[in-house]
Image (spheres, helix red, strand yellow):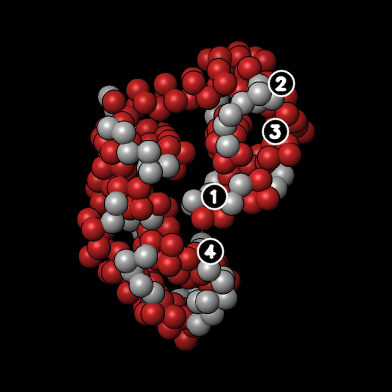
Amino acid sequence: MNRNFYSTLSDIAAVDFDIIDEVIEAASQAIAKADGLGLFMSKPSRQSREAIQLIRETAVWLINVKNRIDSYSAADALRLTDVFDIMHRIVSQRPADTTFINRIILRAFDARIHGDKTVDEYILYRAIRAAVNRRDKAFLGRPLDWLCISEERWYNEASLGYEHTTLSAYDIINRTSILLESDLFAYEGRNQMEFKRQLAENTRRYLDNPDANDTKMRFGGGLYPRAASGIAANAVAL
């Protein structure tokens, strides 16, 4: 979809909330506008005409998503969690309710472990990792076990190298970026920074231009992998 489609604030009202890509695109545009208006600063000015209008439109987005969240597939609902939280912050200056977000994530987790491959395992991994890092008890047990097993499997694959892999570029980009973000002391000890440098160098052609390597990066909610090139640069520099 043309990123200029939502060129005015009132365009959020024209979103078809049954089409998840439109919902995410509208949120992305609203978040970019909020950033341009300084709404994420420590003492934001929320009194300008543009800010007031944006906050109202963002509230409309939130209401529509809340009303439809159970009608979305587990995979689509999961894709909304990050932007939902940011949109909530635009309106109320507070994070979204963790109970609401947790229900979405745990529904996606249940779907994934029961064979629903439409649930993006990398979005799911990062969502569960964030919950574990804030010591959310809802994610102890099976979600935490799945997190550890996934990380170990991806580490073992990366250790062997991707020269003869059948993995897609999307998989390599996500797995590499997750490993570069992670504490790998349990696997590599004091050698973990050298491991990360080598991993970054060996996958640089994927990390430097993710969109060119896999079109799914443009439509699959590839928010985090877009930062992978910067993470790789830092790993090489250390």
Q: Residue at x 69, y 37 (%)?
A: 232
Q: Amino acid at mark 4?
A: Met
| Mark 4 surroundings within 10 Å by alpha-carbon count, few (fewer than 14), some (14 through 19), many (20 or more) | few
Q: Of discs 3 and 2, which sits in the foreground?
A: 3
Verify CB contact (< 8 Å) between mark 3 and mark 1: no
**Residue 208 location (% of width, % of height):** 72, 44
Callout in the foreground (2, 4): 2
Cα–Cα span, label 3 and label 4: 35 Å
Q: Please name the residue that numbered disc 3 is placed on.
A: 203
On residue 194, the disc is 2
Query: Could you tell me residue 8's position as x and y percent?
Result: 50, 82
Q: Secondary structure at mark 4?
A: loop
Query: What residue type is disc 3 on?
Result: Thr
Q: Secondary structure at mark 3?
A: loop
| Location of residue 222 with respect to 88 vertically, above or below | above
Residue 134 seen: no
* First-in-chain label (1 vs 4): 4
Nearer to us of marks 3 and 4 is 3
Query: What is the distance, in whole Å, between disc 2 and disc 4 at their CAs?
Result: 36 Å
Report the mark closest to the observer, 1 or 4: 1
Instruction: Compare marks 3 and 1 and give the one earlier in the sequence.
Output: 3
Cα separation, mark 3 vs mark 2, equals 14 Å
Q: Which residue is mark 4?
A: 41
How far apart are the alpha carbons under marks 2 and 1? 30 Å
Q: Residue at x 37, y 65 (%)?
A: 19
If you read the primary sequence from the N terminus, does the residue marked by circle 2 or circle 1 appear first?
Answer: 2
Q: Tell me the crowding category of disc 1: few under 14, some 14 to 19, or many 20 or more residues within 10 angstroms, Cα based.
A: some
